[in-house]
Amino acid sequence: MSLARVVLASGRAVHLAELRMSSTYGGPLEGYPCKPLNDHKIQWLLRAARQTYPGAPVHLIPPPREYPDQYAGSFGPVEVLPSVACLGSFRSDPLDPAHDHARYRSRLTVVWFQPTPRPPSDCDAEPALREVPWEQLAEDEQF
């Protein structure tokens, strides 16, 4: 059973098997949101995705970055990411039509950011998540 079903722009249905959400800037923040801090957060999430789902391909949806302050501090301008960081494990039908649907599935781990702690669902998922090029990024696995 999946947590949610997301219909991609390509028409492919993918199923969310596991979802981890966290506050982008949760915990004590030393300094202020800026590019170096955000890049570190993104790299940490990608590393966590690779460790949590070894062998699965990992894809980052580049997050939108906002610059609400015109003044730069010692680490550069204020740069803000959406407030919720997401790491999701998705599954779908096999990519290779020769693979038996009962024994194979395709998989992809996705890291993305969104403004609310709402799980993706059907066609109501974040637009960037729905645009994931599944056929180019996912891989088949036998189970």
Image: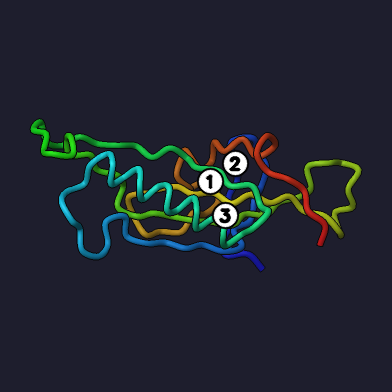
Residue 26 lies left or right of residue 140; in this view the side is left
Marks 2 and 1 sit apart, C-alpha to C-alpha, by 7 Å
Q: Check disc 2: other Cα within 10 Å, few if <14, some if 14-19, many if 20+.
A: many
Direction bottom: furthest residue = 1
Between marks 1 and 3 in the image, the one whose residue lies nearer the viewer? 3
* Mark 2 or mark 3, earlier in chain: 2
Instruction: Classify residue 85 by image quadrant.
Output: bottom left
* Numbered circle sitting on residue 8: 2
Q: Nearer the viewer, residue 27 or 4?
A: 27
Residue behind mark 3: 50
Res. 57 mark: none
Percent across and percent down for residue 40 are: 35, 47
Query: Which residue occupies the extreme front position in the image?
Result: 74
User: Position of 12 compared to 64: left or right?
Assistant: right
The residue type indicated by label 3 comes to Arg
Q: Which mark is residue 123?
A: 1
Q: Nearer the viewer, mark 2 or mark 1?
A: 2
- Image position, residue 107 (x, y; %): 68, 51
Report x, y in % for residue 111: 49, 49
Distance from disc 1 to disc 3, alpha carbons, whole Å, reads 27 Å
Q: Secondary structure at mark 2?
A: loop
